[in-house]
Image: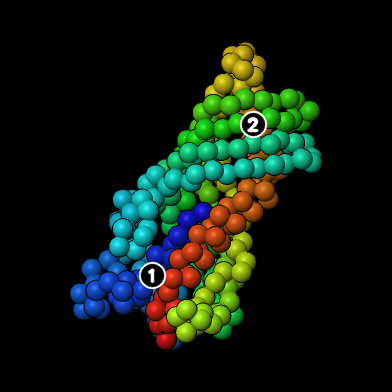
Amino acid sequence: MHGSTILLIVLLNAAYSVYGKAVSELPPFLQICHRSDPNLNECVKNSVEHLRPYLKDGIPALHIPACEPLYVPQVEISQAAGPVSVKSSYSDIKLYGGTDFVLKSVRIDTEKDRVRLKLYIPRLEMISKYVMQGKILMLPITGNGLARGNYTDIDVIVTIQGERYYERKTEKLHFRVIDFYVDFNVGHASIHLDNLFNGDQTLADAMNLFLNDNWKMVAAEIKPALEETIADLFKTFSNKIYGKYPLDTLLPP
């Protein structure tokens, strides 16, 4: 989820220099990257490191919300085939630990308008409200309440495919995301769902134990739906930002 946020932060450095202050007056945490720079990938990585300390509280000047915790209004997952057949909805999601990411590599192809990021997140903690109904390995599961999750050793690959287009309002060239792909692998996960089976504690404890013993299987089944949901969320968010500024402002020649 943080791959797109990282990219947006870097590209918006230039926008801030044009619409905010002059380059000579830029705050020390902002670093402009030029697409003609032969070391563009390294420049992007350095920009992220410069901004990292400010991500927890957000950057109002760049319209970047607080990332610690990162707030996601809602995610819905519907899995209707295989050993996991559930329909679940998560709301008021708070994610802790995302700003501790390690940006392992950046590959920006300016000719093909493509960006590829590799990240490592040591640990994520999630707290949210949930509603769930369905079956896992033929076992019925139903509940609504508070969901808690701890996820460690997370490898994330983000691939962003964009295109350039002429915007009549600004009479300039802009950029938009047409495809956003997310692939993540979790080293280990532990979860706890409150109020399963309408508060039947015996059944709830048994199901939580089962989920934690079989988390890999559950994660593998819902992974495609979750990746697609995350990709759609950040694609929409990205294009809202990109649509405001011309390409030469976001990433100068």
Question: Total of numbered circles in the picture?
Answer: 2
**123 vs 168, nearest the viewer:** 168
At label 2, counting other C-alpha atoms closer than 10 Å, the crowd grade (few under 14, some 14-19, many 20 or more) is many
At label 1, counting other C-alpha atoms closer than 10 Å, the crowd grade (few under 14, some 14-19, many 20 or more) is many
- Seen in the picture, residue 230 relative to 197 is either above or below; the reply is below
Residue furthest to the left: 25
**207 vs 122, nearest the viewer:** 207
Identify the residue at horizontal 59%, vertical 80% (top origin): 112
Dot 2 amino acid type: Met
Residue 32 in sight here: yes
Q: CA distance from mark 2 to mark 1?
A: 38 Å
Q: Secondary structure at mark 1?
A: helix
**67 vs 208, nearest the viewer:** 67
Q: Is residue 136 left or right of residue 19?
A: right
The x, y position of residue 190, in whole percent, is 55, 33
Q: Secondary structure at mark 2?
A: strand
In the rendered image, the quadrant that contains the C terminus is: bottom left
Q: Which mark is residue 161?
A: none
Q: How is the image coloured?
A: rainbow
The x, y position of residue 250, in whole percent, is 41, 75
Identify the residue at horizontal 61%, vertical 69% (top origin): 178
- Seen in the picture, residue 48 relative to 120 is either above or below; the reply is below
In which quadrant of the rendered view does residue 86 lie? top right
In which quadrant of the rendered view does residue 210 lie? top right
The x, y position of residue 198, in whole percent, is 62, 17
Residue at the spot of label 2: 132
Residue at the spot of label 1: 12
- Seen in the picture, residue 78 relative to 112 is either above or below; the reply is above
Dot 1 amino acid type: Leu
Residue 38 in sight here: no
Identify the residue at horizontal 54%, vertical 72% (top origin): 176
The x, y position of residue 66, in whole percent, is 36, 50
